[in-house]
Image (cartoon, rainbow, N blue to C red):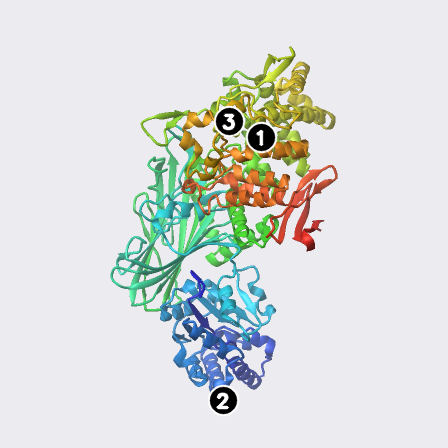
């Protein structure tokens, strides 16, 4: 068996899988139907596959109504006909391929079982001669709830002593496949594809016609049917706890939660963030607030509390299904009292219902009879690490639902979290939860007594309302929020329907937003993971929020929004989900007031956007923070004062959105104001000086460029070029506005006090902006005097085991030729067609070797991958691409526990699409110029250009060439 493989046991259905007793069932039902004068044929019999005897009878009866007694008589008669036929069965009736497969399983020491709804299963297995080979047998006597419920298969897994998550079910009926998937198992479906049509769009499974010729390798593959979509953790390690909490973050564009455990764990960094819920804090001014813990769910086994730091973990498996937005965890746990239980936790943030989250628990007794106590609560006693933000303002409960209201301590933001619990006992009866009114921690509690193999199912549905949501007319805000939360949780469909609709929503997302890579399994999964994390935080319906540097996944940077959003994240959304990109650009429009206040405070007109922005757009970059190595010392943070290129970065995103979407209404009503008021700031910030030739030149001194190892530099090339480009773009936008929308142009000019003299000043700055470019060599100096700084031994770049800023110190790195991330190279990428090949090559050769790729900024590798493609180095590009793609999955910098590297999530897409595929706008539309790594066979994706969807499919052809499709979709 392959190492760490998920397959440890196989569970077979009987009828139609091991033997064709399905034919005997059909003959018995057909005889009964004929005797009763009822229509019945093989098409009707297909619907009887995998369902109970009573359900099969109802299919046979059709519209005919019969009493309970009469139904019992008919079922008994059919059963007599069926049992009479069983005498004919013998070992020769094993279906083709079964005997060989059982031999292979025996040779590999993989146990197997039969799980059938038939109450004659044991007798049939004995006649077939396989009963003695089975690890266990589950039949119609074993459980009350039959397929499509998961109980029968979980009963079989318990009998085998194998975790349900490590079992593969072989089934020939759609109901049986559904039951296997619900049990948390993989499924191999046997039969024609149309038999399983009703399962299309659900959880993945493997299908083949029959078992003839099947090999163990095919079973192993069937046990992992979605390997390109699942990030899997096969063992829990407390040392990587915070890292994996980040990896398993889920969200729906409104709220997101880290992948902490429902029951909790010592030292966890659990949190849930909701976009737009801020509160004041020391040093960093404001932070997104950790919400009341909505997915709390605890389990006690005969009084022993289930937790991974207690008892013994016999098996652990956790994965996120990126395709469906599902987080699942399976644990086989032995309590201190020796009893074993198999637990499955699944949860999701409903992508189609942005206020709703859901949790499901399946608890199966394995070794002993036991009592299971479950408590599902809303924990209001939460903090941002050690900082409290909530006043608890009320709570309430009813038999199946509870709610909690809380208010932030400084900003007076209010939220209400409501929860509803539904549970099914092994008998099929509904459990009755009881409300627990613990102050600040309302909960619903229930209990069940389980025999070995029996399963308790508990579903928890949650709705989160905030005072940012619309209010019903005539209702007080607080009462309205409680009513809205309770109404939403009451009206939300049951778990299975909610899950199906949620998965369908994610299917639609991926239909447009997926990137397909063939020939590289790791790159494929890593790319999808990065896009999933970006989409999980992207606001679908809110234009007053944006994505912070850690998305909604961790405490790093407190949820603050940086240039990362516009330069790294937005391009993916502009090209795939332009409405979401529009929302995020409107956030910048709505925060123009803060940008204007910052400009005014610094003595400039116009809008100077904050380096770190939150709710209002005012600057929230901390000025002093404790030293990372010595907390008794303070470090001055200059980025909020002098890292000013962000204003042009935002204008770049506005221009890019307009260029790709053709959304003239956005530019007319919002974008033009952002661009023009930012230009007013730049024209004032540029300083006129006398050049060496006696002519006026404009300089921008005392700044930080993208490379943050160097501060207080003069004439940073990236900043100066972006300033000039911004002013050029502003003049072009203003000209367009005056021609196409003269009334709006006049109104905006009046509101901004734009004068002809100011516009002329913009032109002066454009024509005379300092930009250190050598026409002889093509070299662009990163900033004045960069090459006069001390060079660094090239060997150190190859051997360093930590950041070069840590090695040299903050001042030492500032004095040397070492880069934290791409600076000039990033400029080349953003304006790739503005520079010739010599300029590209010269600057690649100058700056790539002296960049701290591994321990500098996570923002760098994606742009270096893109740039390497531009200089025809796809293999080198691949190395940089994987550095970016692994930023969180492998945690090379050791800081993934702080949250997702959100810039890298978008940068990975740009490296793949702009770099390897070479997608770029031209005067004739979008063009593709691929340069794929040698081992990639295919790269495919979709994009939207001017309201038209396109599909790009690049395949490697004979002799190293490419077959390229760039097709407009109908």
- C-alpha span from label 1 to label 2: 81 Å
Of residue 616 and residue 962, the one placed in the foreground of this image is 962
Of residue 874 and residue 92, the one placed in the foreground of this image is 874
Q: How many marks?
A: 3
- Give coordinates of residue 373: x percent, y percent: 31, 58
- Residue 762 placement, left or right of 181: right
Q: Quadrant of the N terminus?
A: bottom left
Judged by depth in the image, the label closer to the viewer, 1 or 2, is: 1
Q: Which residue is mark 1?
A: 824
Residue at the left extreme?
A: 337
- Give coordinates of residue 305: x percent, y percent: 28, 55
Q: Which residue is mark 3?
A: 610
- Give coordinates of residue 337: x percent, y percent: 24, 62
Q: Are marks 1 and 2 in contact (CB under 8 Å)?
A: no
Q: Secondary structure at mark 2?
A: loop
On screen, 471 above or below 454? above
Residue at the top extreme?
A: 694
- C-alpha span from label 3 to label 1: 22 Å
Classed neighbour count for the residue bearing mark 1: other residues with Cα under 10 Å, few (<14), some (14–19), many (≥20): many
Q: Quadrant of residue 308?
A: bottom left
Q: Secondary structure at mark 1?
A: helix
Residue at (59%, 21%) from the top-left corner?
Answer: 682
Classed neighbour count for the residue bearing mark 3: other residues with Cα under 10 Å, few (<14), some (14–19), many (≥20): many
Q: Secondary structure at mark 3?
A: loop
Judged by depth in the image, the label closer to the viewer, 3 or 1, is: 1
On screen, 442 above or below 477? below
Q: Point out which mark residue 496 bears.
A: none
Q: Point out which mark residue 88 bears.
A: 2
Classed neighbour count for the residue bearing mark 2: other residues with Cα under 10 Å, few (<14), some (14–19), many (≥20): few
Q: Earlier in the sequence, mark 3 or mark 1?
A: 3
């Amino acid at each position: 068996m392959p190492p760490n493989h998920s397959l440890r046991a196989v569970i077979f259905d009987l009828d139609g899988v091991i033997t064709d007793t399905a034919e005997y069932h059909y003959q018995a039902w057909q005889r009964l139907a004929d005797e009763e004068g009822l229509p019945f044929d093989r098409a009707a019999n297909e619907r009887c596959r995998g369902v109970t005897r009573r359900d099969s009878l109802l299919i046979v009866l059709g519209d005919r109504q019969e009493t309970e007694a009469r139904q019992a008589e008919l079922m008994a008669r059919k059963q007599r006909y069926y049992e009479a036929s069983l005498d004919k069965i013998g070992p020769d009736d094993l279906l083709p391929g079964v005997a060989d497969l059982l031999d292979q399983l025996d040779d590999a020491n993989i146990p197997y079982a039969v799980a059938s709804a038939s109450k004659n299963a044991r007798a049939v297995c004995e006649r077939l001669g396989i009963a003695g080979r089975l690890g266990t047998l589950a039949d119609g006597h074993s459980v009350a709830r039959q397929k499509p419920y998961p109980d029968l298969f979980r009963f079989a897994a318990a009998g085998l002593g194998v975790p349900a998550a490590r079992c593969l079910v072989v089934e020939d009926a759609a109901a049986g496949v559904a039951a296997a998937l619900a049990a948390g198992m993989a499924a191999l479906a046997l039969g024609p594809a149309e038999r399983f049509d009703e399962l299309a769009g659900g959880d993945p499974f493997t299908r083949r016609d029959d078992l003839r010729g099947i090999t163990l390798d095919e079973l192993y593959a069937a046990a992992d049917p979605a390997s390109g979509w699942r990030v899997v953790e096969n063992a829990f390690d407390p040392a990587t706890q915070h890292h994996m909490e980040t990896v398993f973050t889920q969200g729906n564009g409104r709220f997101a939660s880290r992948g902490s455990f429902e029951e909790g764990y010592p030292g966890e960094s659990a949190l849930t963030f909701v976009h737009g819920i801020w509160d004041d804090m020391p040093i960093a001014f404001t932070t997104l607030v950790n919400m009341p813990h909505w997915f709390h769910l605890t389990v006690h086994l005969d009084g022993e509390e289930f937790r991974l730091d207690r008892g013994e973990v016999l098996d652990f498996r956790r994965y996120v299904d990126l395709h469906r937005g599902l987080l699942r965890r399976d644990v086989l746990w032995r309590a201190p009292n020796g009893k074993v239980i198999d637990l499955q936790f699944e949860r999701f943030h409903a992508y189609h219902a942005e206020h709703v989250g859901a949790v499901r628990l399946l608890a199966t007794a394995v070794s002993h009879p036991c009592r299971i106590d479950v408590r599902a609560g809303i924990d209001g006693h939460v903090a941002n690490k050690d900082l409290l933000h909530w006043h608890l303002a009320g709570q309430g409960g009813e038999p199946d639902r509870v709610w909690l209201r809380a208010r932030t301590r400084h900003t007076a933001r209010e939220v209400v979290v409501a929860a509803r619990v539904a549970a099914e006992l092994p008998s099929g009866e509904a459990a009755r939860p009881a409300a627990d009114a613990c102050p600040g921690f309302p909960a619903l509690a229930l209990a069940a007594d389980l025999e070995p193999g029996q399963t308790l199912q508990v579903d928890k549905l949650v709705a989160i309302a905030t005072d940012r949501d619309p209010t019903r007319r005539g209702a007080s805000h607080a009462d309205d929020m409680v009513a809205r939360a309770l109404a939403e949780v009451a009206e939300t469909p049951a778990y299975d329907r909610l899950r199906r609709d949620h998965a369908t929503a994610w299917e639609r997302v991926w239909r447009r937003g997926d990137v397909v890579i063939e020939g590289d399994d790791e790159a494929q999964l890593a790319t999808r993971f990065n896009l999933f994390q970006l989409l999980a935080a992207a606001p679908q319906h809110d234009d007053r929020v944006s994505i912070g540097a850690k998305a909604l996944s961790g405490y790093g940077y407190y949820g603050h929004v940086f240039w990362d959003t516009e330069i790294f994240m937005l391009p993916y959304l502009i090209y795939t989900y332009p409405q979401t990109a529009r929302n995020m650009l409107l956030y910048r429009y709505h925060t123009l007031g803060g940008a204007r206040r910052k400009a005014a405070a610094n003595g400039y007109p116009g809008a100077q956007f904050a380096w770190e922005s939150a709710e209002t757009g005012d600057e929230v970059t901390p000025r002093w923070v404790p030293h990372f190595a010595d907390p008794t010392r303070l470090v001055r943070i200059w980025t909020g004062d002098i890292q000013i290129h962000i204003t042009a970065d935002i204008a770049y995103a506005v221009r890019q959105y307009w260029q790709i979407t053709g959304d003239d209404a956005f530019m007319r009503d919002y974008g033009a104001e952002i661009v023009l008021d930012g230009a007013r700031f730049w024209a004032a910030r540029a300083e006129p000086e006398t050049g060496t030739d006696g002519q006026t030149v404009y300089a921008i001194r005392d700044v930080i460029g993208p490379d943050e190892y160097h501060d207080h530099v003069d004439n940073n090339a990236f900043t100066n070029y972006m300033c000039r480009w911004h002013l050029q773009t502003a003049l072009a936008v203003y000209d367009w506005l005056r021609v196409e929308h003269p009334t709006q142009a006049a109104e905006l000019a009046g509101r901004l006090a734009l004068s002809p003299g100011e516009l002329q000043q913009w032109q002066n700055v454009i024509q005379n902006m300092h930009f250190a470019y050598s026409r002889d060599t093509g070299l662009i100096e990163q900033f004045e005097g960069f090459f006069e700084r001390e060079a660094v031994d090239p060997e150190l770049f190859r051997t360093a085991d930590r950041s070069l800023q840590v090695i040299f110190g903050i001042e030492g790195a500032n004095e040397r030729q070492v880069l934290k991330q791409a600076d000039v190279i990033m400029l080349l990428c953003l304006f790739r067609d503005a520079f010739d090949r010599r300029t590209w090559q010269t600057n690649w050769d100058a700056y790539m070797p002296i960049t701290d790729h591994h321990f500098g900024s996570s923002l760098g590798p994606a742009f270096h991958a893109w740039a390497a493609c531009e200089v025809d180095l796809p293999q080198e590009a691949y190395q940089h691409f994987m550095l970016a793609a692994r930023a969180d999955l492998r945690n090379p910098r050791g800081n993934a526990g702080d949250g997702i590297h959100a810039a890298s999530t978008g940068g990975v897409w740009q490296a793949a699409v702009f770099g390897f595929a070479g997608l770029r706008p031209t005067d004739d539309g979008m063009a593709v110029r691929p340069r794929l790594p040698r081992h990639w066979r295919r790269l495919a994706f979709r994009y939207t250009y001017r309201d038209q969807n396109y599909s790009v499919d690049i395949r490697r052809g004979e002799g190293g060439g490419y077959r390229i499709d760039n097709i407009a979709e109908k």
